[in-house]
Amino acid sequence: MLETIKELSLINATSGREKAVRDYIISKIEGKCEYRTDALGNLIVFKKGKKEPKNKIMLDAHMDEVGIIATYINSDGTIKFGTVGGIDTKVILGRQFVFENGAVGVVGVKPVHLLSSDERTKIPDADSLCIDIGVSSKEEAAKRVKIGETAVFVSDFVQFGNCKIKAKALDDRVGCAILIDMINSELEYDCYFSFSVQEEIGLRGAATSAYGIAPDYAIVLETTTAADIIDVPDHKKVCKLGDGAAVSFMDRSTLYSKELFDTAFRVAGEKGIKIQPKTVIAGGNNAGAIHKSRGGIKTITVNTPCRYLHSPSCVCDTRDIESARALAEALVENFANA
């Protein structure tokens, strides 16, 4: 899956602008399944397995990534912007972005020698920031970037250290790569797959895809914050790179079924799959929309731990990705006739 993750991470696709990712996924699964695109832009896939399950199962991963959106052009040609999804202002400062049409810009900050003593101890307010695209007038800027155009971090894909990868958008191109790999494999049971849109701005695509598929069980393939870095207390590390797939018991959008949570750990133990709990109640993902769809859907989230989430330097461990892939397939086989 590594080459697929690399290629996916280098595609630029903020929420609402997922077409390039969708087209790439279609190119990878063409001829291996049935697929359609719904009105919101979700890619809905049906893959025939060896057997027909008693329960309909859906697996979901979102295609969009965080970014910024142009909101106003200043007289000097710099551009005001808002964020698309949750981005900490600290990871924006001084960063390079690329717009949909290829225009490149840098989020500029005041030089350190011009900062007041008070300014040196504070993070600038996001509303005070502008992106510099290298022009000197409003007219020039308007020819290069339109209001409402989005941009993403400029970031290379890098393999480093012990089984580590670094890139932008590993949230959730890792999940997309896992689903692509499953679709291209021989499955034990028929499955539905949702490559959903607009997760980063409110879990929007998954709500419509879950309603359309109407599954009995859903498995969300996601990444989640790994705070396993120096000076973070153990009880706040959330999960750790290298310790396997992280399964959620509760986050800010879902209180997960204790039965499914326990099933994940039991199945992982039986199959020899490395697994860990997500130990902090934080964040949220498409499970928040899926489990409330129709009359309710039994939903579980299988996460790949990721350091520095929603930044240009997301870091994952390839062994955790393999664990998440193995656990997802094992859960499909368990839920099929549950």
Image (tube, rainbow, N blue to C red):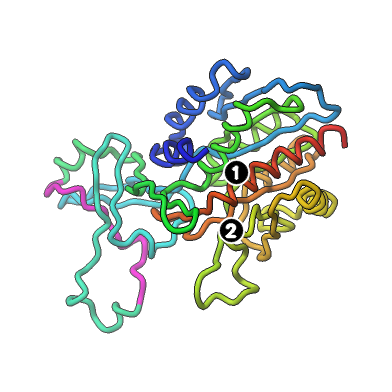
| Horizontal side, residue 220 vs residue 68: left or right | right
Asked whether 40 or 308 is in front, the reply is 308
Residue pointed to by mark 2 = 242
Residue 159 x, y percent position in the rendering? 41, 50
Please report the residue visible at 60 percent of the width from the left and 43 percent of the height from the top.
203
Residue 127 in the magenta stretch? The answer is yes
Rate crowding at label 1 as few (under 14), some (14 to 19) or many (20 or more) other CA atoms within 10 Å.
many
Looking at the rendered structure, the kind of residue marked 2 is Gly
The first of marks 1 and 2 along the sequence is 1
Q: Taking 159 as reference, is 49 left or right?
A: right
Residue corresponding to mark 1 = 203
Please tell me which residue is depicted at 55% across the width and 75% down the height of the picture.
232
Q: State the image quarter where residue 127 is shown.
A: bottom left
Disc 2 is placed on an element classified as loop
Residues at circles 1 and 2 in contact by the CB criterion of under 8 Å: no
Amino acid tagged 1: Leu
- The answer to which quarter of the image holds residue 62 is top right
Relative image position of residue 8 (x, y in whole percent): 45, 37
Residue 167 position within the rendered picture, expressed as x and y whole percent measured from the top left? 41, 49
Q: Identify the residue at image location x=71%, y=38%.
A: 329
Classify mark 2: residues with Cα within 10 Å, few (<14), some (14-19) or many (20+): many
Q: Is residue 338 rendered magenta in the image?
A: no
Check disc 1 and report its element: helix, strand or loop. Answer: loop
Structural distance between the alpha carbons of marks 1 and 2? 28 Å
Mark drawn on residue 55: none
Query: x%, y% of residue 294?
Result: 77, 35
Please name which of the two marks, 1 or 2, marks the residue nearer to the observer.
2
Please state if 62 lies on the left or on the right of 151 as rendered. right
Q: Residue lying furthest bottom in this view?
A: 117
Which region is colored magenta?
Answer: 122-137
